Amino acid sequence: MTVAPTTALLGVSGAGKSWLAARIVARRPEFVRLSAGRLLREALHTTGKALRTAPSNDVLQNQNRLVEVFRKAREGQLDRPILLEAHAFIDNDRELVDVPVEVMRALGVDGLLVLVTSPELIQARRAEDPDRRRPERTFEDLAHQQKYMLAIARNYARQLPARMAVIQSGDVDGACRFLDQVRGSLPG
């Protein structure tokens, strides 16, 4: 049996990953939508804040745990493509902790859909979401974080290797076209 592709939807916190993922799955119901954060919160019985603000070595251990819980979540669904909301790094309030390429490889990532938007919009979304506490960052910090995320994603694409596309927040059509390309590029 051929395993359907896994595409990681990457973006800084507040870029609109969840919004976009919900709309993609509405158009492409064959996709299984998974969230790295949700998988870890459920598996570790913890909060998003506790995961995000953990010391860097704990953040890295959590990424390795993600691989285990992702594989369990995928059991019985190997024939369905996966859209995984994820991060290239975790901002734990003290430093940016990169998610190692080995984690992306172990997750079986075939495609990288990288979401970007203006720092002003990210900051506004973070302020409007009272349920998810995120670090307060300046526009300059957020612009830097997006550039940093893009550099990490490009490195993932080279090392995995994986297809990669950069899209603007809200570009559901562009996201669906990319997902169709990833699905069509794998041996059937």
Image: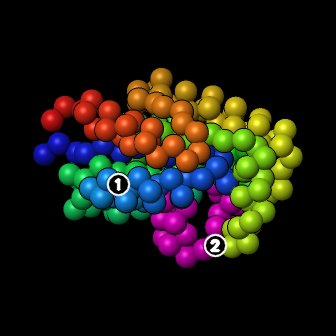
* Label 1 vs label 2, nearer the camera: 1
Residue drawn where x is 45% and y is 60% of the image: 22
Residue 159 point in image, percent of width and height? 47, 26
33 or 153, which lies in front?
33
Residue 78 point in image, percent of width and height? 23, 53
Dot 1 amino acid type: Arg
Q: Are marks 1 and 2 in contact (CB under 8 Å)?
A: no
Q: Quadrant of the N terminus?
A: top left
Badge 1 marks a residue whose secondary structure is helix
Give me the disc on residue 47. Answer: 2
Residue 50 in sight here: no
Residue drawn where x is 19% and y is 31% of the image: 187
Q: Is residue 146 left or right of residue 158?
A: right
Residue ID for mark 1: 27
Residue 68 point in image, percent of width and height? 41, 58
Q: Is residue 3 left or right of residue 175?
A: left
| Label located before the other in sequence (1 or 2) | 1
Residue drawn where x is 83% and y is 56% of the image: 136
Dot 2 amino acid type: Thr
Q: Is residue 138 above or below residue 148?
A: below
